[in-house]
Structures are given as C-alpha cells and as structure tokens.
C-alpha cells in the first residue's frame, strides 16, 4: 500500500520539467491592450528618433555664424521672419541676421543651425517688424536635437519576451505599432482535489475547510502571465476524476491539480497518470515544503500535481510552473529573480532538505535583508499574504544564524533570472 | 507674452496636490476578480485556523499515554479501529491501545492527542483485524495542528489598502469572502495636446511625431491601480479645448492633459484653467524634467497639466498623480518606494534643480546599485523602456560621482512608501 518514492534534488526536478517547457505562440492585440503583455517579436524603430533635427526648447532658430560677435556690450539683432509651432514647418529661407521663432519640438528651419532659448533673447517690435537680440554667441549645433541621435531607423530597441511596461508602450506608439504581436497567454487548467474542501460561500462544518488553493493558484497563474481556467473540485471517485482530467486536458496547454499526490489512501492522481499513459517526470523532490510534488508529461502537455498543502502548493507553482509559463512568453529569464540577503532570524535546526521559506525581503540602507513571515509550519496560510520572497536554505547538516547571507527568490519581480 | 513663473520645491508641490487627494470609495467584486485590487476593509478571520485540531500528516491518531513504554526493543501494538480521510470525522470512541488511521488535514478523533507519522508505524493484519505498532513514545500534542494556532476568529489579518496578492487571495477564500470589498478604481481622463501629434497608425510626415504620451500614460494609470479614459487629442482651438475639457471633467475623478502647459505661444491650458475657475496649485516646479508641470483643482477634482515631453510627462505622473491614486485605493503608503543605492556613473555637472533621472537599479551581492538608462536628455523616449527607478539627485552646487550613495524611487514596486 505504501509506495516507495525516491526524492530528487530541486534543480534536477526543475530541469526535468523545463525539458518539456515547449514554445510560445504569438497573437496580435491592439496597442491599448498591450500593457502587461510580453513582446512576441523585437521592437524596431520604423524611423529615426528624432525624425528630423528639432528644437528641444521654445526659442529662436538662428544661423550660429551670425551670433559670433555677440557679447554683453554688443547685442546682436535678428529680424524674426516667421513663427513655427510644433508640427509646423518653416516656409521661408533664413538669411543672415534673420531668426525664426520656434516652439519646443518643431523642426529646425533649413539654414539654421542653433537655437537661442527664449529666456536668453530680448524680443521687441520696430516699424511693424519683430526683432530679437542676444548678448552671447552660439555654436553650430547648440540646442538642437539631431535626427537619429536617440535611435536610428531599423534599430532593435526592445528584445522579444520583454514585458510591456509604460516605457515600452510609449515606444510602441512612437514606432507605429497600432497592433502588437504579443505572446498568447498559456491556458492553465486547475482542479482542486480533496473531499475536505468546502466552497468559499459554504458555511464551515466539522472536519472541513474552505478551498483556498484554487483561488490562490488562479492568482499565481495571472501573476506569472498566463490564463487560469478553473474546472472545479474533483470528487473522490476514480472514474469521474479520470474522465474530468482527460476532458480538461483537451482545453488547456497545461494542467494543475492541487492535492491528491501524497501517499494517502485517497490520493488517486498516481493512478490517473498511469491510466492516461503520462510519463511521470518525478513524484518526490528533496525539498520542504512540497516534497510530494509530482509532474507528468503527456503529448506535449505538462500535468502538475501540486500538494494540497497551501504553502507547498504555492511554492510548487513558483518553482515548477512559472518558468514554463515564462518560457512560453518568450522570456530568456523564466525563473524567479535570485538575490542574496542578510538573514534577520535564526534557523538553528539543520534540515536534510532544501527549504523554501516564505519570507519578507526589505531594503535597509541599500542592502537586502530577509526574515521569515509567520512560523513557517507548512500548513499555515496566513503568512503567504505577507511573503514577497522565498528564502532558500540548502539542505545539510547545519542551521542558519542571524547575520548569515542567504539566497532569496523574489516573488513580485517581473524581470526574472536565466538560471 | 512671456509669463513669469516662480518654481516651488518638489516636496511642496507634492504636498499641495496631496491636500486634495480626496477619499477612496468601495465596491464589491467576486473573489475570482479580486486579484490585483486593493482591500477596502481589513480582512478578518471568520473562524479559527485551523478550525479544529487536525493532523498535519498521514498517519495514526493515538492516545500518547499508550505509547509511553514503546522503544526499539519493545514495540507497542495498537488496534486500528477506523480510517478517516480529510473532511471526515471519526465515529468511534478510541479506547486504550486503539488507533485511528488518519489522513493529512483530518480532524483529530476525540480522545486522541498525538499523531504517529505513517512511515514510523508498521501496519499489519491479524485475525481479520488491522494493527500497527510503533517503537518510540509520543508526547501529548505531537504532530497535531491545534485549533486557532494560526489565527483566531476575529483577528484582523490583512490591513485595508493592501493590494490583493495570491496569498491574500488564499486568505479571502479561507475566510469565506466569496465577495470582496475593494477600492473602486479612480477614473482618470486623459487628453493629449499638440498639433505636432500624429495617431499611432498615421504615416510620418515632416515636422510631426506620433502621439506616444497618451499610450504611455494609460499604462502608467493602469500600473498605479486606476482606470484610464482616453478622450483623444485636443485641437489648437481654445473654445473647442475648453468645451472638451469641461465635458470630460463630468465623467472622471481627475483629468490629465499632456502638453500645452509651457510658456509657448500655443499653450492654452493656463487660459483654460482660468476660464474653468480652477485654482492653480502651482505651475512651475524646481525639478528636471517636468519643471512646467501644472496642477489645478476644481470642485474636488484635480487637473494635472503634465509636460508634453515624454520623460517629463512620465515623471510628472509618478510624482504627482500616483500618490493621489494610491490614496484613493486606501493605501497608507501612497508614494513610490524609496531606497538608497550606490551610483555607478558620474554626474559631474552640478544642477540647481532636483533631477529625476530615469535609471535602472540592480541587486549585486545583496546591495542596490543604480545607473542612468540612456543619455537622459529629456526628449528621448527609448530610455523609459528600461527604467525601473527614478534616481533623485538633489539640486545644488555639486555634482555626483560613481560610488556615491543616492536616493532611488522604485517604479515597479507595489508596496510604496508613506513619505
């Protein structure tokens, strides 16, 4: 009755899963809907930026050579022959000692090669004409933003797989991407298992608890960039479970079940994997929590059997599912971002297994510190709400002490890591 | 023609805006839609967690006293009288040297006070009855998760204003929040101004550029937790502008315009504020970029006149609009998170104004480093895509050198700061 399982190291488990991570697919969305999505192709400049020599200030465009003799005692006068706003183009040729009143962003008139900032010029009228005078010389190129100085047409500006942030959104608009090729969100099916689970709106009854994993996982799926499809609770009947899982697999890119993977008498998933003909990649990992995490593979689809324990379920998602999702979003950094931090608490008890401790990292004087949130018994749920990192304590014969440097994996970071 | 404006310090500008930040409003959403929203009330436990004494492991529930004499040479035998799964409740009274086979999460049977993990027991059949034996004693309380040890009924577990992350989502489910009171997203109207602006799908023509600010700002609005409503481009006709702004104000909680606030001849917004009867809180700030940022107030609504320059527009949003949005999402930390970082580049030129430099912060050996992205000329847009922080260089007579400690404001952080 009691199946013997051999735990494998965490890194090996992740490697086995990532072999089947698969490829992303592209879809096209309108620019207005692109924020938060992931680029399915690199973003290229369709024109020089700036697209023409332009003025970065309100002022007067002049020929620098005419200003050469200007100084405090010898103001040089220019006739203002025209005024152009942003978006307008000068219509007149500028002759010696003539100037064009120019607004921020407007194209430098032909013949001009410098801009005098408005506050450095004195403007006045005489005989129905407009003049301005300056008391210092300007060099060719002064106060001009040159065509292409920011980006050249054809430049690859943002790599494929980048999450579209407000700055990327601005670039997409600048370069005419009214429609944007983004990664299609992988569809992830979710089943909860466990006859002890009540619906959220159910009143509590003796021996039962409300189903929290399904909602937690849906949020994790969204955070990682995928689309959750919740299929509900699996009943404790093997044939019903099997039919439900088989039918769900047709509708999704990968499938998560929570619970049902330990060696308890009511845990059907190992049997179901077998009946499906799925290849079990592993069914025990040398880690806490989540040692009973099982991952199987069938016809290009991954089946994640996460623990029913909330913390183990949470950690299992971030370790094994997230990197698959991010790979399909074309990321070259699909893993949680890793950093080192100073430990702010003692962990005196050694543990043979690698521990992933729900933790809170903070920045103090420019340095990262980390402290566990809650007691870290694997069955408590409240601490997950405050966790922004997993602290990774390698298994072994020693404990850890306050002040030690430890590795942390950041949960809310968007950038990721390539290892 | 040239209006004289007096710049005020950044902190004073922010203070003046925040005086009119206003109050948040609550709305109710289904739990499935709650991820990423902000709690409009504190999350309270509606029951003890665990709701009953329960087993954290698969194993056998026993009376600890019966195991007192067990050791390697003297295994103690228990008759297994019943098996209960998670969600089931024991039906029989447990007498001396009897045990109940119990699954993870199941309620401890009355009379039992310890759980023997499955792998520590030897199970066997004899005369049609099931037995198990153990070779070590257990103390009362061993391997039991006690009712209420994680949370007590009525405990406030997560404060109002918290962003709902996957862990909070799990808690909401656990405590029966099938519907969740969250902050209503403030509606933010957006107008772009500038006759030089083309639509994203327009081909480039001489002197014009595509409108990128409107898309960038919409993404910033979403990132900060609000809802953008883009009203399009304002034309260069004063009466049309005025009518459009007046009508938009009726539909939104606050209004953003990009461009039209500098002292150029075509900048109408100061006139429009006057005609609306809006109180201008300031129209010049001692900062770079974004010195011409204007904020006005009318009947409880803020009007943000951001610069048309993309970088200044971006910075203006994060400095002045974001904290108002977060305040209305019930956050007590509405400002961008502040940290210190080691500067990785020289800024030798002193500047009288506080500079907000688009930057990239990285974690190296547990310490924060910061480097500017791009050349930081205020008219370039490409650098915004890579920025994850604003580096704050206070105005004054000195430059900054590589290795200096500087302040950074983190753009992608969700936690915020109370100052």
Image (cartoon, coloured by chain):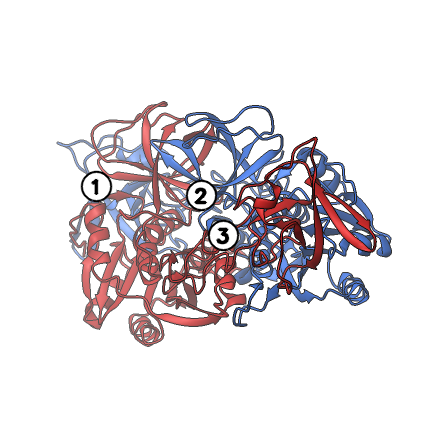
Chain colours: A blue, B red
Nearer to the camera, A344 or B268: A344
Label 3, residues with CA under 10 Å away: few <14, some 14-19, many ≥20:
some
Which image quadrant for residue A14? top right
For mark 2, name the chain: A
- Check chain identity for marks 3 and 2: say if they share one: no
Is any atom of residue A46 visible in this view? no
Q: Secondary structure at mark 3?
A: loop
| Distance between the alpha carbons at the discs numbered 3 and 1 | 77 Å
Label 2, residues with CA under 10 Å away: few <14, some 14-19, many ≥20:
some
Camera-side mark, 3 or 1: 3
Residue A201 left/right relative to A267: left
Residue B40 left/right relative to B382: left
Query: What percent of the width, then of the height, locates residue A76?
Result: 20, 38
Residue A34 left/right relative to B72: left
| Distance between the alpha carbons at the discs numbered 3 and 2 | 19 Å
Q: Residue at x 24, y 54 (%)?
A: B263
Which image quadrant for residue B341? top left
For mark 1, name the chain: A
Query: What percent of the width, then of the height, locates residue B172?
Result: 48, 62
Q: Which residue is mark 3?
A: B146
Q: Which residue is mark 2?
A: A373
Nearer to the camera, B2 or B344: B344
Q: Secondary structure at mark 1?
A: helix
Query: What percent of the width, then of the height, locates residue A103?
Result: 32, 52
**B76 shown above or below B397:** below
Pointer 3 and pointer 1: residues touching (CB < 8 Å)? no
Q: Which residue is mark 1?
A: A120
For mark 3, name the chain: B
């Amino acid at each position: 009755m009691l199946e013997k399982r051999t735990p494998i190291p965490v890194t090996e488990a992740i490697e086995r899963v990532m072999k089947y991570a698969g490829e992303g697919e592209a879809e096209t969305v309108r620019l207005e809907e692109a924020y938060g999505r992931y680029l399915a192709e690199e973003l290229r400049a369709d024109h020089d930026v700036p697209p023409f020599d332009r003025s970065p200030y309100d002022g007067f465009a002049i020929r620098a050579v005419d200003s050469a003799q200007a100084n405090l005692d010898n103001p040089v006068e220019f006739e203002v022959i025209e005024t152009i706003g942003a978006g307008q183009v000068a219509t007149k040729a500028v002759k010696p000692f003539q100037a064009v009143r120019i607004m921020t962003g407007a194209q430098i008139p032909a013949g001009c090669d410098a801009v005098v900032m408005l506050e450095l010029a004195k403007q006045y009228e005489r005989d129905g004409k407009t003049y301005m005078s300056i008391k210092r010389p300007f060099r060719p190129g002064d106060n001009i933003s040159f065509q292409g100085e920011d980006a050249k047409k054809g430049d690859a500006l943002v790599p494929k797989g980048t999450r579209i942030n407000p700055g990327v959104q601005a670039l997409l608009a600048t370069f005419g991407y009214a429609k944007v090729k983004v990664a299609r969100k992988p569809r992830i099916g979710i089943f909860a298992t466990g006859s002890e689970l009540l619906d959220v709106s159910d009143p509590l009854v003796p021996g039962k608890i409300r189903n929290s994993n399904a909602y937690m996982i849906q949020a994790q799926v969204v955070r990682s960039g995928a689309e959750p499809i919740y299929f509900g609770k699996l009943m404790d009947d093997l044939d019903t479970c099997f039919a439900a899982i088989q039918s769900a697999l047709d509708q999704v890119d990968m499938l998560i079940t929570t619970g049902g993977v330990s060696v308890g008498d009511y845990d059907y998933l190992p049997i179901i994997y077998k009946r499906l003909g799925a290849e079990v990649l592993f069914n025990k990992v040398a880690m806490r929590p989540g040692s009973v995490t099982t991952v199987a593979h069938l016809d290009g689809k991954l089946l994640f059997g996460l623990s029913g324990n909330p913390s183990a379920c949470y950690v299992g998602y971030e370790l094994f599912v997230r990197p698959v999702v991010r790979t399909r979003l074309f990321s070259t950094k699909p893993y949680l971002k890793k950093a080192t931090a100073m430990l702010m608490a003692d962990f005196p008890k050694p543990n043979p297994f690698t521990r992933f401790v729900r933790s809170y990292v903070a920045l103090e004087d420019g340095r990262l510190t980390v402290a566990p949130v809650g007691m870290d018994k694997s069955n408590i749920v409240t601490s997950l709400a405050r966790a922004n990192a997993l602290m990774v304590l390698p298994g072994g014969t020693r404990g850890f002490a306050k002040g030690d440097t430890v590795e942390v994996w950041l949960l809310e970071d968007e950038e990721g890591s390539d290892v």
